[in-house]
Amino acid sequence: MENKNKRETFSTGLAVFFATLGSAVGLGNIWKFPYLLGSNGGGAFLLAYLLCVALVGIPIMACEFYIGRKSRKNAVGAFKELKAAKGFKTIGFMGVGSSVLIAFFYSCVAGWVYSYVFRALKGDFVGVTAATAKTKFMTTVVGPFPPLVWQFIILAVVSVILIAGVKNGIERITKTLMPVLFILIIICDIRALTLPGASQGLKFLFHVDFTQLTGPVILAALGLAFFKLSLGMGTMITYGSYFTQDNNMISTSIKVALADSLISILAGIAIFPAVFSFGMQPSQGAGLLFMTIPLVFSQIPFGSVLLVAFFLLTAIAATTAIMSVIQVPVAYLEEEKGIGKKKAVLLTTGIIMLVGILATLSADSSSVLGNIHIIGKRGFFDSFDYLSSNILLPIGGLITAIYIGYFVKKDDFKLELSNGGTLNNYAVLNVVHVFIKYVSPILLVIVFLNSIGVIPSLLKLLHL
Ligand code: TRP
């Protein structure tokens, strides 16, 4: 395909892989995955999650890459460029909505991570015990002022990076630091596995209790798959628009999904043995990571240095991931509304800071706004998360699958994803197409209907 807009592209396949991974790997892996798994029945949730990644996540990622590389445009402009029916542009608009919703609570949690770097540096966690780990987390979260200041700091850092346009530099940093994060998590794993009673944590993580597979648990797993792989709101469309013509986008999707899942599982192996060994509850919610990691690193040589390094790298991963979230509204304001970059960034982060206050002040039930319920029993923080991850991202994914499955000619799809036939992967593409046309959309609809209680019996069928 001719490159109409003379867009820059990533230089190599490896650059594509790491850039995409830089968006995918973030708090979703290190903070959200363990906490949701802990609150949703352990191994059963892991199984549901992996099935969602394989049956829905990978095919939808390939669709987003297709739309991006074929159009070489941002999420809103892409559907226009591909002459899709007008309605499909809603994905772009929904993407802008989901991205700010995500940023409201993501910036709050990223702020906690920044504050943990600072506290670890000060030696705040020396001699920490299970009981004090909890109090320390509470002082970070309940605030009200410190968490707001940290949220402001992270948004300021992101604004400066986006305005200065040093994104490429940042990507280079990610490429070197991602392996370091990986090694640190492995060190964490080794330590966690040598704790007394570690096997109980592994059993919790890997043993599947099928009675736990309820509708809401599966919906949470589905939402997490979208969240972790940065799907359903156009982020991967934008990344695809920078891919080289010779990138094998199916294998990139699979590799990113595998690497992302591996990092999550390794984070789980670091956390759950510690949870059981120190007599904590796996279902304690959003604080799980923050309460266990200081314990994992206590009492080992260089523990305090490793603790600083762990939270520092998590902070960097969170920063690069949130940049890819904020980039969606920023690109929309710049490219579709003609607003200058600086203004677009400041407007977006300004709104995120203002509304994000609601998330930060409702993160725990003892927070200032902790008792206000928005969706069901959820406060602001959880409602922003639920609405974006569990509702909007899967709907974005559904619309994407319907577009590719029913509105794009199968031959066009195969031509683009085989790089004009050079990859000789038609057999694989036929299978992927069946997934996109039937498996992923049907599963998405079933999970929705089931979770709102319409067809619980259908889910039983799926268990077989
Ligand atoms: N995937 C990132 C994480 O796991 C978060 C993220 C970045 C995201 N870009 C996204 C989530 C786009 C949904 C959509 O932390």
Image (cartoon, rainbow, N blue to C red):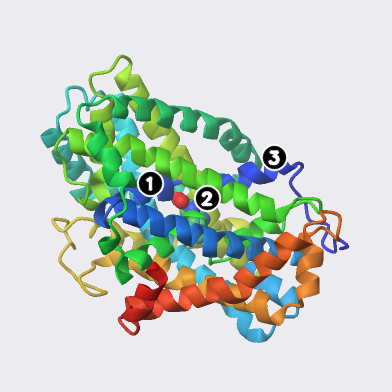
- Mark 1 Cα within 10 Å, few/some/many (few <14, many 20+)? many
Left or right: where 279 falls relative to 207: left
Q: Is residue 396 visible?
A: yes
Identify the amino acid type marked 1: Ala
Q: Where is residue 73 drawn, in percent x and y?
A: 72, 65
Give whichever of discs 3 and 1 has the lower sequence position. 3
Q: Residue furthest left?
A: 131
Quarter of the view holding residue 415: bottom right
Camera-near label (3 vs 1) is: 3
Mark number, residue 14 = 3
Residue 167 can be seen, yes or no: no
**Residue plotted at (76% across, 74% down):** 410
Say which of 65 and 312 sits in front: 65
Which residue in the protein does label 1 denote? 110
Q: Establish whether ligand 1 lies closer than 8 Å to the Cβ of label 2.
A: yes
Amino acid type, callout 2: Ala
Position in image of residue 222 (x %, y %): 43, 64
**Amino acid type for the residue under numbered disc 3:** Leu
Residue at image point 19% right, 38% down? 276
The quadrant of the rendering that contains the N terminus is bottom right
Residue 239 at x, y percent in the picture = 65, 55
Task: Write down the quadrant of residue 459 in the picture.
Answer: bottom left
Report if the CB atoms under discs 2 and 1 are less than 8 Å apart. Answer: no
Q: Between marks 3 and 1, how big is the CA–CA gap?
A: 27 Å
Disc number placed over residue 24 in the picture, else none: 2
As measured in the structure, the alpha-carbon distance from the residue carrying label 2 to the one carrying label 1 is: 15 Å
Q: Nearer the viewer, residue 201 or 288?
A: 201
Q: Are marks 3 and 1 in contact (CB under 8 Å)?
A: no
278 or 110, nearer to the observer: 278
Viewer-proximal residue among 57 and 200: 200
Q: Is residue 201 left or right of residue 88?
A: left
The 10 Å Cα crowd at callout 3, few under 14, some 14 to 19, many 20 or more, is: few
